[in-house]
Image: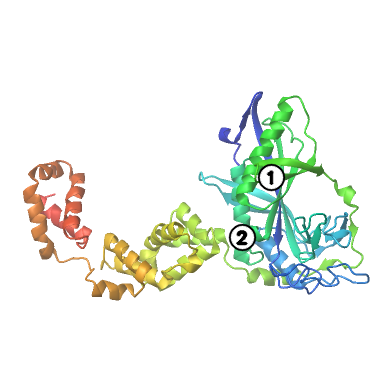
Amino acid sequence: MNAPVKPSQLIKGATGDWEMVIGLEIHAQVSSSAKLFSGAATEFGGDPNSHVSLVDAAMPGMLPVINEECVKQAIRSGLGLNAQINLRSVFDRKNYFYPDLPQGYQISQYKSPIVGEGVVVVDLPDGDSVSVGIERLHLEQDAGKLLHDQHPTMTFVDLNRSGVALMEIVSKPDLRSSEQAKAYVSKLRTILRYLGTCDGDMEKGSLRADVNVSVRKPGEPYGTRCEIKNVNSIRFIGQAIEYEARRQIGILEDGGAIVQETRLFDAGKGETRSMRSKEEAHDYRYFPDPDLLPLEFSQAYVDELKSGLPELPDQKKARFIGAFGLSSDDAGVLVSERESADFYEAVLAKLSDAARDGKLAANWVINELFGRLNKDGQSIDASPISAAQLAAIVDLIGEGVISGKIAKELFEIVWTEGGDPRELVEARGMKQVTDLSAIEKVVDDIVANNPDKVAQAIAKPAMLGWFVGQVMKSSGGKANPQAVNDLLKRKLGL
C-alpha cells in the first residue's frame, strides 16, 4: 500500500490544497528486426518509405502474419513487470481515419490483451518508494509519420514506422506528483532495456508517453482527466504534468468545468494545448480482427521465456547491497542503467578480493569514474579507463600498496596516458611507505615543532587527525595513514 500523499505533493490553490492524479500510457517500440505483421525492416533512419512492405501499405488482398519474436518480447516485458501473462489474447481493429494510417484502422488489442495486471516499485529521490499498478500491456502496430515541412502546400507521408510493433503499457492512476511520474518512466525504461525488449531511445521515438492528468481536493472522487499525447522526454513529462494540473485548478477555481479532451505539449512554450475532444472506446468501433486468429500459447512456453530472463534492476540492487554492503543509494545509481551495472560487474570480476573491496570499487566507479565521464561529457562505453584498469587501482588500495590520495593521481595518469596501473606504480615510485622507521623522523619533527597541538591531542584524541594530515602532506601522500596513526598514538601515549 502506498503512503498517503505528502503535503509537499499538494498544489496550493486559492480555495485550498489540490491533489493531482496521474496515469501513464507508455508506447514502447518492440526490439525486433521485423515489424509486427510483416517482414519489413524496423531499423531507424532509412529513406522515407524504404522499409514498407505491401502489408504495411495496406495493399488490397494483403494479410497480416504475426511475428513470433514480438510476441516473445511482450511476454518477457510482462514477466519483468511482475504481471499476469494471458495464455489467450485477441487482436482487434481500432477504427479511425488519419493520413498516416493506410488501413483506416490500427491492429491493436482491446478486451483481451497479452499481459494483464502487474506492479512496478519505484524508488524516489527522497528515499521513499511508490508501487505503481500496471493495468495491462498489449501489442499494437504503429502508424506512419506526417512530414509537414517538406513542401509549402502539401504534407508528405512516410510509412517506415507503419506496422512497427509497439507495447502499450497502461498504468493505474497511482501517481501523485510529476517527480513520481518521471521516476516511474525512468524505472520502466530501465527494466525494458535490461530485458532487451525496447531500446528506450526517446529521441528516436522508441519510447513515448500519453499522460493522463486530473486534479481533486484530497479525499474526493477522481476528477475529469485530460490526456496529453506523445510526450517524448522524461523532462517534458514532468513539465507537462505541472502545467496541466495548474491549468485545471485555475479553471475549477474560477467555477468552470474540465472537458475531457486530448491535448498536446508544446515544449517551446512549456504548455499544453487542446488537440481534440477525447474519444471513448465505442468511438473506435473495436471488433476482433477477422484476419488474425486468437493468440494462444502454453504455460510451458511462458516458463521457458521466464527461465531466460536476465537479472533485473531490483534483484541486482538487492544482491549488491547484500554481498558488498553498498548503500541503497549507491546500488541504485549502479543499476539505474544496464551499462553502469555491467561495468561495475566487470570491475568486480577482475578484483583479487571482491568480498573485501566490492564496496570500495563501487565508490570508485560512482565518484571517480562517473564523475569524470560526466565532466568530460562521455558515455561509459567510451571510458578511457577499462574495468580491468580500475579494478587494478582498487586492488592496489585494498592491498595497502598505495593510498587513496596516490590512487587519484594514478587514476589521472591512466585516464590521460593509459597503461597498467601496477607497472606505473613501480616505474614512478608511487608505493606508499609502510616502513615505520622511514617516517618516524617526520613524525618526531612534527611533534617537536607543535607542542600546543600535542597538548590538544592528548586532551582530545580526535585532534590526532591533524598530525596524520601533516605527516601525509610531508611524505607526499606516500605514508600509510594507518601506520602513521599507530605511530602517533605510541609517541603521544594515547
- Tell me if residue 71 comes above or below residue 377 in the rendering: below
Q: Residue furthest left?
A: 448
Number of numbered discs on residues: 2
- Estimate the x, y position of residue 268 in percent, counting from the top left: 65, 45
Name the one closer to the observer, 435 or 86.
435
Report which quarter residue 460 is drawn in: top left
Query: Is residue 27 rendered to the left or right of residue 105?
Result: left
Assign a secondary structure to mark 1: strand
Numbered label attached to residue 191: 2
Q: In the image, what residue occupies the spot 12% across and 44% down?
A: 453
- Estimate the x, y position of residue 293 in percent, counting from the top left: 88, 68
Mark 1 Cα within 10 Å, few/some/many (few <14, many 20+)?
some
Residue type, label 1: Asp
Residue type, label 2: Ile
- Estimate the x, y position of residue 371 in percent, counting from the top left: 42, 57
- Estimate the x, y position of residue 102 in percent, counting from the top left: 86, 62
Report which quarter residue 88 is drawn in: bottom right
User: Looking at the figure, which quarter contains the N terminus?
Assistant: top right
The answer to whether mark 2 and mark 1 are in CB contact below 8 A is no
Q: CA distance from mark 2 to mark 1?
A: 28 Å
Query: Is residue 62 rendered to the left or right of residue 193?
Result: right
Disc 1 designates what residue? 266
